[in-house]
Amino acid sequence: MTINRYAKKRDKNERGIINALEARGHKVKQDDFVDLVVQRPDGKIVLLEVKSEHGRLTKIQENMLGEGWLFHVVRSVEEAITAVEGEEFVA
């Protein structure tokens, strides 16, 4: 196994998504497995993979979704809020 000597490239829309989720009371941590690990105020954890408008999943990410891994692919603040809060979320 080699050591990654370069920082992971982040999508330009990621910071806005983080700021919006934190403003709504969620804890957000950037990660390398998926882009964002979000903890809702009720303790539920939601995994987000942030993509730019035309960004594509990697082969590994496509395989993970095919294997039933539960993470959301989001491209905007609105999509991120919907993925994290869903219809059942009450603040």
Image (tube, rainbow, N blue to C red):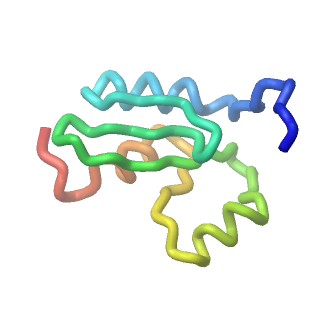
The answer to whether residue 87 is above or below residue 27 is: below
In front: 86, or 40? 40
* Residue, far front: 1
Number of marks in the rendered image: 0
The answer to whether residue 10 is above or below residue 44 is: above
* Residue, far left: 90
Residue lying at 25% horizontally and 27% vertically, measured from the top left: 25
1 lies left or right of 72 = right
Q: Quadrant of the C terminus?
A: top left
Residue lying at 22% horizontally and 41% vertically, measured from the top left: 43
User: Where in the figure is residue 26, as x and y percent of width and height?
Assistant: 30, 31
In front: 91, or 5? 5
User: Where in the figure is residue 50, as x and y percent of width and height?
Assistant: 60, 44
58 lies left or right of 83 = right
Residue lying at 84% horizontally and 44% vertically, measured from the top left: 1
User: Where in the figure is residue 88, as x and y percent of width and height?
Assistant: 17, 57
89 lies left or right of 61 = left
66 lies left or right of 10 = left
Residue lying at 58% horizontally and 48% vertically, measured from the top left: 49
User: Where in the figure is residue 65, as x and y percent of width and height?
Assistant: 58, 70
